[in-house]
Structure formats: structure tokens, C-alpha cells
Amino acid sequence: MARPLASIVSAGVTKFGVREGVYSRELFAEAAQEAFQACPNLSPKKDIDGLFVGQMSESYEHQAHVAPMIADWVDLLPIPAVRTEAACASSSVALRCALLAIKSRMHDVVLVGGVEKMTNLPTADSTEYLAMASDFPFEQWHGISFPGIFAMMATAHMAKYGTTQEQLARVAVKNHENGTLNPKAHFQKRITIDDVLSSRTVAWPLRLYDCSPISDGASCVLLAAPKLAKKFTDTPVHIIGSGQAQDTLGLFERDDLTTMSVTKLAAKNAYEMAGIRTKQIDVAEVHDCFTIAEIIAYEALGLCKPGKGGKLIDEGVTGLGGKTPVNTSGGLKAKGHPVGATGTAQACEIYLQLTGQAGKRQVKGAEIGLTQNVGGSASTGVVHVYRRGD
Amino acid sequence: MARPLASIVSAGVTKFGVREGVYSRELFAEAAQEAFQACPNLSPKKDIDGLFVGQMSESYEHQAHVAPMIADWVDLLPIPAVRTEAACASSSVALRCALLAIKSRMHDVVLVGGVEKMTNLPTADSTEYLAMASDFPFEQWHGISFPGIFAMMATAHMAKYGTTQEQLARVAVKNHENGTLNPKAHFQKRITIDDVLSSRTVAWPLRLYDCSPISDGASCVLLAAPKLAKKFTDTPVHIIGSGQAQDTLGLFERDDLTTMSVTKLAAKNAYEMAGIRTKQIDVAEVHDCFTIAEIIAYEALGLCKPGKGGKLIDEGVTGLGGKTPVNTSGGLKAKGHPVGATGTAQACEIYLQLTGQAGKRQVKGAEIGLTQNVGGSASTGVVHVYRRGD
């Protein structure tokens, strides 16, 4: 297996959900405090020399230029602080930039995370702001938003492969089940296939319970050069593979609506860099903004063949007791989807799993983990591979 | 002097100004085409393995998630593409991330640039969108915008050091003079001290001609690992120093309104990395969003002592025939200030100067160049040092 690119030495994540009375800067500081307190050997002000923050939208809080603001709120001024934006993959791109920073040797220890405060405005505003991640002249302007975009992927997948609404529903049921085991999850509620199939249609075939919620939240990890990791923790988690790829902004420009080319390519590059095969993955967090996205992720990551994602969920392979548990955190569907926070929240879950701190949802003996995050209609795709430290 | 971090092998910049009938993606492609055509030994699709783009605002074109869109428009899909945002320093932060990418050895050749399309909306909208780079609860909400913020710096500087409105005006006159020598500049018009002093007050003591304009434009550079540079060009420009620092988002939180701590610290770090002293700088592009900002930049960069910036402009030191010409491009003031494009446009000018391609504004024999860019009220500061290749 490959040498580490960088090592996670701590992680923090806020309760996701409706977080009233706080600004995004306060949410981020809450996540950072958790990460700092869990890593007493690290002195933030002395050791951290860079900050990378993913946040999607300036519109919710009428606030751009958030990197220095967040650096201030976590008491890390005047170190270099960078905001990256890649829609719902914003903080996975921040994580990748942080890897470049560590690997460049221009940084030794960086704080990398993401945040979004979304519930302060009506849902219609959120729908509009999120739609900015699709193409303005060719998509938004014509009135489509993301439920419609993912519904088109779902209908294409159903038409080509016979995937059913029950299979989509099963993704939601699994992730809600996992969410009840994660105290930080937005939803703490079991649901049934019938609950999903009888919920109102948002964009056919996607029903309310096929859609991730609008949430507030923040997440972060502390990333160190591998040679320094043991100074800060006895149980580092190494990042051993990183892949990122882009596709057209518009879904309509794609040859095939039933897959995500960015995930396929990012996974290929991340696996090669890590020197692993898909079957070695013990636990994965994937991007289930809508249930169909998790089905497609299974296929694009190579957990099953194209078209067999529905069968995979039917057979329980990705459930907590299955061969490759997916979205043990509850996923975007039940943990919540504060878009800027989602990428590093996935990394936090894998860190907990590979260090044996995942509580009731712990995957026993997990050694290799994976995160898969997409932005927009999978115009951006990021995959990272993690290995438990020795 | 230090070894190069990375090498610029080509550059492109659009005409700045009011660019009707195009989207930002088209402007960026125009800049990229210029850079590609000037570098025939480089095959974009084959050689470029990363894209970094600075853009400030999603609001002008109702468009976030611009990195994959721009990658598509310059025909570079599916390579990793990253958007950074740091207000008016967005593309300088992109350039710094691109340096990390090259130095990490995970990338060999990257395209890095910035773009903003601002003139399609009324000036009042621009003022509001730009104000998002200041603190919402503590600044924006109370009605202040950037002319007011920089006016407070100017009055503090005048009170502490006796800096005069004539000295501020002289910055505008110099930069407009330089702008007449740059065919890409927004303004191609000489102005006099009297023109500035008789123009209408925007926020006392700043008058209309003390303020940079709202412009459309894009800029980019092609950055390669130093060992590959000669494969693509006989005349590379090496980046030998890079510094970035952050300060509070709010101006009101600072101890001293008459300086920019971020520029001082970024310059210190960049000079140390480059192994140079201030007096070695042959040509510089600095952030003159308002005339007072250029005066403060002189002092923060060490071109003169604190409080002596007014004297420096009076003595002609920073004019085209002076010891250290500053803003030969026309600066933000006359070249224009499409905020996302500004950072890499500064790098483009230094590239032209150090390769002897700056036409009528050429600084003879220039070997060492510098760029200084700030975001917001200097909450972000980035400084780069460049050396003419052997």
C-alpha cells in the first residue's frame, strides 16, 4: 500500500440540523473546538500553519470572504486561510488543497473543514441558491433545480437497468437506520419503505424521503505531515489516495445520465495512488444527496457492476452488518447536508470508524475507508482513501 | 537568491472594461486562448493537469461552482479544477494554491487565473455584492461599504502622518498615465491633479478619481514545475517567494487603520523565501483599489518608512522613470478592477515586464518583480516575488 500523503490527527463535527441563533463562523468554531479538545498534544496557535475552508454560498448570510473571518473565530490569525467553493463538494476540494499544502512541505499542520448555515431562510431561497451550482443560461434559467436534475438521472437509471422506487427507498431506510446511531445526525428517526413510497413526490420518481434535508452544520479535521502525526496522536488516520475530476456543469451535455464520470475517474486515480482495490474498502461515506446518487455511487466506485446498485442495496451489502457498510453516519440523507460541511464531515466519520470511536455504528476492525463527494450534478467529483495508522 | 517554487511559461489577459454580451466563462476562455497561443510548445489538453480559478461573486451571474464550467470552456475537462474566493485577492490565492500544487509534485503544469463579469448590473448592486467581503453583522448591516472603509484608512493616515489629498491624487494621475500605455487597460485617458480634486466626493476624502472602476475582465498564467519550464519557453519567469496572511474581517477590530498588517507579514515571508531585500525590486504591481491603498502598500512593502508613502509618490520614485516603477499596467485604478481577475492580472504584468514584452511601459532591464494584492479591507494579503529566468 502507498505511503501517506498526510495524516488526520483529530476531527470535529457539530450537531447537524436546525441550529438557531448562530452564524456560520460560530458553527465552525464549535467543530474546531471539538477537534482541538480531542488533540491535547497539539497547540493550535503554535502548531497550525494553514486553514482551508469549504463553503458554498455567500447568499445565506450575505457574507463572502469567509476564510479570514473563520481564522479569526478559531483564533488562528494571521496564518494563510483559503476558501474553496465547489458546491456540495466544497470541503472535499478544501481537503485536497490541504493535501497539496502538506505535500508541498510549505505547511506542516493545517485545519481543514467546511460549514454552511442554511435554515435561516425559506426553503425556496435555499433551492434557488443551491441551483447556482448548475448552469445558469442552460439550466437554472429554464427553471430546473436539483431535485429535477437528479430525478432525470433516476428515470434514466430505471429505464436502462430496471432500478425500482423500492430500491431507492431502501437507501433512505438504511441511512435513517444508521442516523439513529449517530447523535450528531439531523434526523434520529427510523423510517420504512412504505413511509418513503407514501411521502409526497418532489420530482418524480423522487419523493420527499428520497431527498437529503437542508441543514446547518460544520465539520473539520486536523491534517499533519505524516512524519509529525505521532507527535499529536497515537492513532492517526492516513490519507493514502486522492482523486478529483470534473465534468460539464450542465447535465444535458453528458452522454450518459446513469453514471458519474467524475466519481469513476476520481476513484480510479485515488485507488491507484493508494495501491488498493475496491474490495479492500471496509467502510465508505458516499454522496447520497438523493437516494439515486448513492446507487450510482456504488457503481461508479466499483462496489458493483453498472446497473447493479439496486441489487446491492437489496442484498444488504452496504448495511451496517454487510460486507461494505456505506454511510454509517446516516449519510447526507439522515445526518444532514449543510453543503459546505459535507465533504469533511465524511472524512470525520471515516476518522471515527478507523480509530474505533464510532460508538453504536462502529464497523469492527475497519482498516481502509473511503469518501466520495460530488458537487452539483456531479460536475465535480472527489474521492479520498484512508488507512488506519499503525 | 532562492530556488524557484514554480515557473510562469505564458500569460494571457483580456481587454478590461465594459465587455458586453459575454459571460465570465467566455472572458476566461479569451484570456486562456491568449496564453495558449503565446506558448506553442505547450499542448493544453496533453500537458495541463490542473486548473485554479479565482472568482469573487456568485451574485453577478447567479452562478456558483464555476471551476468545472471554466474547465469545460477552455477544453480541459476532466482535470481537477478548483475555485478559490478571497474577495479582491481571489486569484492571488488561486496562484498560491497552484504553487502548492506544483511544489507538491502532484501537478506538473497548471492553468491559474481569475475572472469577474461585473458591469451587467447597476453600480448599486456591485457595491452591495462587493460589500459582502466585509463583515455582515458588524459592518455591512450598518450600511458601510468599501469606499467608506478605505476613506477611514485615508483620514487616519492623513491625521497621523499629514498625508494630503494631492498626494492621493498623484497616485491616480500616475496610474492613468501608465494606463494610456497599456492597450488592455479599462481607461486610456490622462488626468490631472485638478481633475481628481474637482471630481465628486464618494466618501471624503476619496473622490471619484481616487476609486478604481467596476470592470469586466479575465487573466491567467501557465505555471509549470521549474524543471519543465524550458520545455515550454526560452523565457520563463520564476516565482521565488510567496506570502499570505490574514487579519480580522472587520476594519473596526484593528489597532491601527494606517497600515495593512497582512501585506507587511506576507511581504516579510515572501522576501525571506525569495532571499531578496526590498531595494532589489525593479517593478511592482500593488493593490490600488483606492489611491490610499497604494500609499499604504508602499509603506507595508518597505519601499519607504511608515508615513512616507505620500512623499514617495511626490518624488516620482514609483513613476515609470523612477527607481521602482509601481503599477506600470495602470493598476486597478486605470487598468480596471474585475475583482476575481486582479491578482493574476498583476502576475501577467510582471511576466510581461520580466520578459521584455511590456511595450511602451517596459521597465528596462527588470529582473525582480513583485505583486501585492489584498482582499476586503486587507483581511487577506498576498505577496509574490518573481525573477526573470536565466
Image (cartoon, coloured by chain):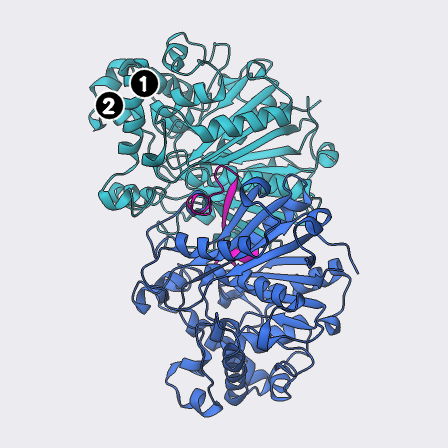
Chain colours: A blue, B cyan
Magenta residues span A69-92
Q: How many marks?
A: 2
**Residue B200 spot, x, y in % from top left:** 20, 25
Pointer 2 indicates a residue of which chain?
B
Q: Residue furthest top?
A: B315
For image coordinates 62% across by 30% down, the residue present is B239
**Within 10 Å of the Cα at label 2, are there few (<14), some (14-19), or many (20+) other Cα atoms?**
many
Residue at the spot 61% in from the left edge and 25% down from the top edge = B272
Q: How far from the left and from the top, in percent, is residue B255?
A: 36, 29
As for residue A91 lying within the magenta part, the answer is: yes
Q: Earlier in the sequence, mark 2 or mark 1?
A: 1
Q: Quadrant of the N terminus of chain A?
A: bottom right
Q: Chain of mark 1?
A: B
Work out whether B303 lies above or below A332.
Answer: above
The one nearer the camera, B186 or B387, is B387
Q: Where is mark 1, residue-wise?
A: B168
- Residue A303 can be seen, yes or no: yes
The answer for how far apart the CA atoms under marks 2 and 1 are is 9 Å
Q: Amino acid at mark 2?
A: Pro
Relative image position of residue A112 (x, y in whole percent): 55, 52
* Amino acid marked by disc 1: Leu
Which of the two residues, A120 or A255, is positioned nearer the viewer here? A120
Residue B95 percent across, percent down from the top left: 56, 38
